[in-house]
Image: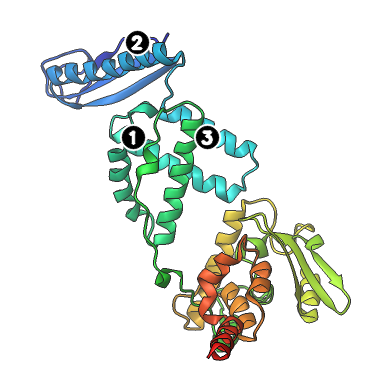
Amino acid sequence: MTEIPSIDIFVRHAADCPHRDNEHWKRCRCRKHLRWTWQGKQHRKTAKTRSWEAAERAKREQEFKYEDAQRETLTENKPPSTVEEAVKAFLAEKRGGRSAPPTLGKYKLTLDRLQEFCDRQNIQFMREIRLEHLSAWREEWSKYYSSKFALRNNQSRVRHFFRYAQNAGMILQNPATSLSTIKITDEDFEVDPFSEAEFRRILKAIPKCEEIGEPIRDRVKLLMQLQRWSGLSMVDAVCLEKTELVKTGKYFRIDTTRRKTGVRVSNVIPRWLGQELLKIKNVNQQYFFWSGESSTKSACSVYDKLYRSVFNRAKISHGGSHRLRHLFAVSLLEKGVDIRIVSRALGHKSVTITERYYAKWNLKQQSTLEQSLAKAW
């Protein structure tokens, strides 16, 4: 049976309050707080009032929550789960499923924000969360995310969490299933690759970046070329292992697994690029660019700052490492390479994803469509 804790009201007196030595003094206008112990853990929270009478009402509301939890326990023969307990269990399940560290980091960030919202709303148990709470919380997401994709991905993580909570018996109904879909149009999927001229301008700007040391400039240039000719994302390029560069005949091959999707990528790269990679001197002999001591996020952050310096020097607006990956994909499509091959080279889980982003550059598909229409005429 769920225990109903004894809740104590106490006062956090102002420094100049004459009754500051008595935390149970009722008649001053200092802030009132609640304190109790539940399941071996002490809890403290503000009563959001300076009135002792209003604090008594806040105390009673908190007691009602535990009384409701006790009735739920008697009905389901299972103790209620707090938001904190549910978050810990979910993240443990994700770690046990060997989710990639960047994915775990995103889940933890999302759920830390959910916990903070619940604390503000005086929500302790999972069963208290309603659709209206999630809708109000979603309005705050624009503080953290500027793109619709990021908003949609965050909502997907929230839905995944609540689905887990329902499957684990922590909640009877899942409020997240009723959240409206975040609408994304075709225009939102448009990508902006570097042009070949812009890429050449970027490479020429690297030696002029005096704020970057010469050995580092060479590494930045090689990393950019690796992304452009292999289609790797920054994290996959930065964390590329030396064993993942394989010599095949007169070419070299990048044979790795994408950290984001777990999809295997096996792309040939120019011979000169493979030879230049082999010349790299790194403190960690396992990797080309990464020390292996920092987190992958930190390693990418360092190179991202270096990239921005180069883009600024080259006078490239809205520069980003992903535009190198887009250049790789678009250059293939413009030469008539089948989009299914490009999809495999990018490490996408489905060709549908590739079509969504690169449809307007798919010249082979457009040509086939025109020939089919002409033949039908």
Measuring from the top left, give residue 332's x and y in whole percent.
64, 81
Measuring from the top left, give residue 344's x and y in whole percent.
68, 67
Q: Amino acid at mark 1?
A: Cys
Q: Amino acid at mark 3?
A: Phe
Q: Residue 223's image quarter? A: bottom right
Local packing at callout 1 (Cα closer than 10 Å; few below 14, some 14-19, many 20+) is many
Residue furthest to the right: 249
Labels 1 and 3: the sequence-earlier one: 3
Labels 1 and 2: the sequence-earlier one: 2
Measuring from the top left, give residue 22's x and y in whole percent.
21, 13
Q: Between residues 326 and 358, which one lies in front from this camera angle?
A: 358
Q: Which mark is residue 118?
A: 1
Local packing at callout 3 (Cα closer than 10 Å; few below 14, some 14-19, many 20+) is many
Which residue does the numbered mark 3 point to in the structure image? 90
Q: Is residue 158 left or right of residue 99?
A: left
Question: In the rendered picture of this protein, how many numbered marks are placed on residues?
Answer: 3
Asked which secondary structure carries label 1, the reply is helix
Which residue does the numbered mark 2 point to in the structure image? 4
Residue at the spot 54% in from the left edge and 36% down from the top edge:
91
Q: Is residue 101 left or right of residue 243?
A: left
Residue at the spot 33% in from the left edge and 38% down from the top edge:
117
Asked which secondary structure carries label 2, the reply is loop
Q: Between residues 359 and 293, which one lies in front from this camera angle?
A: 359
Q: Is residue 216 visible?
A: no
Q: Amino acid at mark 2?
A: Ile
